[in-house]
């Protein structure tokens, strides 16, 4: 083979390698799905992507999407850790209702719901209870060795009842500007929920990737017994994921309910556990446990929220949103599946074999 | 024996010029393989030689890049294992591939149940299953759960399943790796009967003795290429090994090595661990054991004799319910593996796949795991520290391929074992408990691991070495603790005059005493 042709063919191979590596990256298909969705929305409703800056705040559909995405993002980030261990937490929706009900009931009973201090206490109360619930879930799973699905289903069902008890089956409403700010305010022109979600994301990334927490968690999720024999404190690790997940569900409840300041224990967080699981799966994490992707989960949350918005843009009844969510989830999950990747690779190989077979140098089985 | 296969008879299976390519890797190149009816054909080669790839090419798991296969003279190209099964090629894998929680009859007859109208006629199905089991001399109740059987009987059930499929070709992939001697003998009787009924049997095993005992013909592979096809009777062992390894006689002599001897002064090495009456109900009877530095202690005994149970108590995998353990003269409670790890005791499991590797993590992460666990979650190893450790052990243990980012599940068995050894060595242990460290891996790696064990002892560490192969135990151990029926029955100082027979005698005596008492 002449020298030129050889280097040329190597270039082709390199380019293909980059393509292969890009398409097999866990973020590739979720981002493709998101971009396609956004472009479709822009086509259907020109100006969809426009963001304006007035009165020191950003406004626009995109900003709204990000604000709304904060709730599923917070749920999904906690859920990703639980799923990494091979578990699942179905109680997050109910926990949202409990923490919001508690916070609002406390605010209503207090003499000064307007003061920042009272709001801080109210929020703290909601979060502490959410954390305790997470610890309880962890106890069921780790201490009593109940299957996570069943263990967390207990509070998924009972949790809403607890929230009803707290609110005495009334829709609790309060007026408290500092509390409302948590859901509809701005920090540096950016909606507060977005900032909260980002802070949580950064904190979790630091916790999982700057320490050994993430790797050990994945190890437990892939092979629990091998990890135990290697000295990994798997009980503590698994337990802590349920605590984090519960805490973040509590935070999500407060952020979600803050704009309206109404605690409707029957409807807050309804079916949100499924949204959270969808975010995690869209982000490339497998339900069987093991490798987890926090950044992918964030993208998943934005995709889900964009679909909800797109349904409105396309003038479809909002009840059809779950259908489109399902379609996108299927498309992304199929594209990420190893079978699809094998199939694509085989096709590529066959095409290569047709033009010029590349000699294999190494022999491994 | 050989006359049973006339030379001019056409082969049942003929594979010609088989080439299988994985992305960037040629796993098999231009391999020819023939399988005759009524013969046991052993497929030999080291790990990574291409044995399993060839089997998978035959059974439709892998697609051929080049080459052709004929069955009974007709060209075939299977697209799935189901097609291969339908054509009469059945495979029994190393790990039993059945459903432990279904009944024996259901497992054996799966997909071939006797029907009455649209319903399964269970009683007839069970009767049919019993017939097949009878042919294999397996007297069990077909209604019992499969999981209640021993591994050996489960293995036989898997073979019964192949008979149900009316297989013309039976592939046995490491069927004996978890059987004891008696069970192997029974399995071989069954294999011979099936062979004499005209079935072609493809046999894969790392145990040379067994291969010589059962096979009529051998095909040797090395590095994805055919080295040769020979009649077993015409192929001396030494030549087979050199075909497999591609090494000279001198190198082979070094591998075979010699028994470890030691002088009087060696016995005075300091005591590291001392167990007194340590036991666990339902697992192993109380035993006492001293482990000294610079010593390799062998644990000998049959499968199920309590070897692994002793190891699990010493490493904290199971909690003892009686007795005391001193480590370096201090009384300790080995409550869990992490505690043992902190006392510099590590345990390498016999079940690499289930309790050893973390498949979806990289080689690097697998090596780091135990060290990281001991340092604690919040004190991660820095990338430079970790790279240095990984580099050091991958070179020292010669892990292939030398790419720490590769997922461990893509490595061959021998290399997985090396990575696991690296995981434990990275924690700088004083006591290594190695449970079947050489099971299912090739001769070359086996010798490397044996050499490593003696070297570790020379460095002042202690090693507890467990193996079903007594020869291997006698080769590396200074002292041997003999186990029988979940109890420690004696201890032998190893030496030139002590051999495998001494251990067998000890076991024999113990079981006689037990029979007398009963």
Image: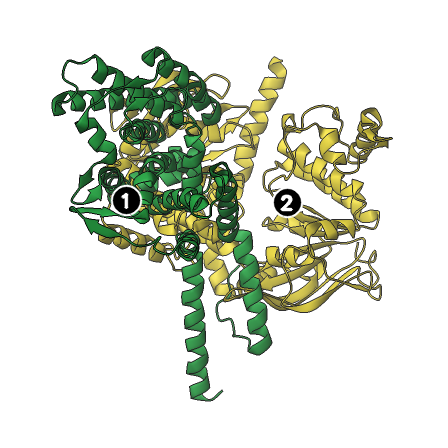
Instruction: Indicate the chain on which mark 1 is placed.
Output: A
- Indicate whether B214 appears above or below A134: below
Other residues around mark 1 within 10 Å, as few (<14) / some (14–19) / many (≥20): few
Q: Which chain is green?
A: A
Measured from the top left, where is residue B125 in percent x and y? Answer: 81, 29
Q: Are marks 1 and 2 on the same chain?
A: no
Task: Report which residue position mark 2 lands on.
Answer: B93
Instruction: Indicate the chain on which mark 2 is placed.
Output: B
Specify how the rendered protein is coloured: by chain
Q: Quadrant of residue B275?
A: top left
Q: Residue at x 13, y 25 (%)?
A: A116
Q: Quadrant of residue B163?
A: top right
**SS for tag 1?**
helix
Does residue A140 appear in this view? yes
Task: Report which residue position mark 1 lands on.
Answer: A209
Does residue B242 appear in this view? no
Measured from the top left, where is residue B514 in percent x and y? Answer: 59, 18
Q: Colour of chain B?
A: yellow
Measured from the top left, where is residue B490 in percent x and y? Answer: 47, 26
């Amino acid at each position: 083979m002449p020298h030129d042709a050889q280097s040329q063919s190597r270039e082709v191979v390199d380019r293909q390698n980059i393509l292969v590596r890009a398409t097999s990256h866990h973020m590739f298909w979720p981002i493709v799905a998101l971009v396609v969705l956004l472009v479709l929305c822009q086509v259907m409703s020109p100006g969809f992507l426009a963001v304006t800056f007035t009165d020191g705040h950003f406004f626009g559909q995109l900003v709204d999407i990000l604000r709304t995405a904060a709730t599923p993002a917070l749920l999904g980030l906690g859920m990703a850790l639980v799923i990494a261990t091979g578990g699942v937490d179905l109680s997050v929706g109910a926990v949202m209702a409990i923490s919001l009900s508690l916070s609002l009931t406390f605010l209503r009973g207090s003499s000064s719901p307007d003061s920042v201090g009272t709001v801080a206490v109210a929020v703290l109360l909601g979060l502490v209870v959410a954390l305790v619930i997470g610890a309880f879930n962890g106890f069921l799973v780790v201490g009593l060795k109940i299957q996570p699905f069943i263990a967390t289903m207990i509070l998924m069902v009972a949790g809403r009842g607890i929230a009803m008890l707290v609110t005495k089956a009334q829709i609790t409403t309060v007026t408290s500007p500092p509390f409302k700010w948590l859901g509809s305010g701005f920090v540096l022109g950016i909606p507060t929920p977005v900032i909260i979600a980002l802070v949580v994301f950064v904190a979790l990334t630091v916790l999982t990737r700057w320490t050994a927490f993430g790797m050990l968690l994945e190890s437990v999720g892939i092979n629990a017994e091998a990890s135990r024999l290697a000295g990994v404190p798997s009980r503590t690790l698994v337990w802590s994921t349920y605590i984090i997940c519960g805490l973040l569900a509590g935070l999500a409840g407060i952020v979600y309910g803050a704009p309206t300041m109404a605690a409707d224990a029957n409807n807050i967080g309804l079916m949100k556990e499924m949204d959270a699981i969808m975010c995690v799966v869209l982000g490339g994490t497998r339900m069987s446990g093991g490798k987890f992707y926090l950044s992918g989960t964030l993208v998943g949350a934005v995709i889900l929220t964009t679909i909800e918005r797109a349904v409105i843009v396309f003038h479809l009844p909002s009840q059809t949103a779950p259908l489109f969510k399902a379609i996108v989830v299927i498309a992304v999950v199929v594209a990420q599946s190893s079978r699809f990747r094998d199939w694509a690779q085989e096709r590529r190989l066959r095409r290569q074999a047709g033009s010029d077979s590349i000699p294999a140098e190494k022999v491994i089985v | 024996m050989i006359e049973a296969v006339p030379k001019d008879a056409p082969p049942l299976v003929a594979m010609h010029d088989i080439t299988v390519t994985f992305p960037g890797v040629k796993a098999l190149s231009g391999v020819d393989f023939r399988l005759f009816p009524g013969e046991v054909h052993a497929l030999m080669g080291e790990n990574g030689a291409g044995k399993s790839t060839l089997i998978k090419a035959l059974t439709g798991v892998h697609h051929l890049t080049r080459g052709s296969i004929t069955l009974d003279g007709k060209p075939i190209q299977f697209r799935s294992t189901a097609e291969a099964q339908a054509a009469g090629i059945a495979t029994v894998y190393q790990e039993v591939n059945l459903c432990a929680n279904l009944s024996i009859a259901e497992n054996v007859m799966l997909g071939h149940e006797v029907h009455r109208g649209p319903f399964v006629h269970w009683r007839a199905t069970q009767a049919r299953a019993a017939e097949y089991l009878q042919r294999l001399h397996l007297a069990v109740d077909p209604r019992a759960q499969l999981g209640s059987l021993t591994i050996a009987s489960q293995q036989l059930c898997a073979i019964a399943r192949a008979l149900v499929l009316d297989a013309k070709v039976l592939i046995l992939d490491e069927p004996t790796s978890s059987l004891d001697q008696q069970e192997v003998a029974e399995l071989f009787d069954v294999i011979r009967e099936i062979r004499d009924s005209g079935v072609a049997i493809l046999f894969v095993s790392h145990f040379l003795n067994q291969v010589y005992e059962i096979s009529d013909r051998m095909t040797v592979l090395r590095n994805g290429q055919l080295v040769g096809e020979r009649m077993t009777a015409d192929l001396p062992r030494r030549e087979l090994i050199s075909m497999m390894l591609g090494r000279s006689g001198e190198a082979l002599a070094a591998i075979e090595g010699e028994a470890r001897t030691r002088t009087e002064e060696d016995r005075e090495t300091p005591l590291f661990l001392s167990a007194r009456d340590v036991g666990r109900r339902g697992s192993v009877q109380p035993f006492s054991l001293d482990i000294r530095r610079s010593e390799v202690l062998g644990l000998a005994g049959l499968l199920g004799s309590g070897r692994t149970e002793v190891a699990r108590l010493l490493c904290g995998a199971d909690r003892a319910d009686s007795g005391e353990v001193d480590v370096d003269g201090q009384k300790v409670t080995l409550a869990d593996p992490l505690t043992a790890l902190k006392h510099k005791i590590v345990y390498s499991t016999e079940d690499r796949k289930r309790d050893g590797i973390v498949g979806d993590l990289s080689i690097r992460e697998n090596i780091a795991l135990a060290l990281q666990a001991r340092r604690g979650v919040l004190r991660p190893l820095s990338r430079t520290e970790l790279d240095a450790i990984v580099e050091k052990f991958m070179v020292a243990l010669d892990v292939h391929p030398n790419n720490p980012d590769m997922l461990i599940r893509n490595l061959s068995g021998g290399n997985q074992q090396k990575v696991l050894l690296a995981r434990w060595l990275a924690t700088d242990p004083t006591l290594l408990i190695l449970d079947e460290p050489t099971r299912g891996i090739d001769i070359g790696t086996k010798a490397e691991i044996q050499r490593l064990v003696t070297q570790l002892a020379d460095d002042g560490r202690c090693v507890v070495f467990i193996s079903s192969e007594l020869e291997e135990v006698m080769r590396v151990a200074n002292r041997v603790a003999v186990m029988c029926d979940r109890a420690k029955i004696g201890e032998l100082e190893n030496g030139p005059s002590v051999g495998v027979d001494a251990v067998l005698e000890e076991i024999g005596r113990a079981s006689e005493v037990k029979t007398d008492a009963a």
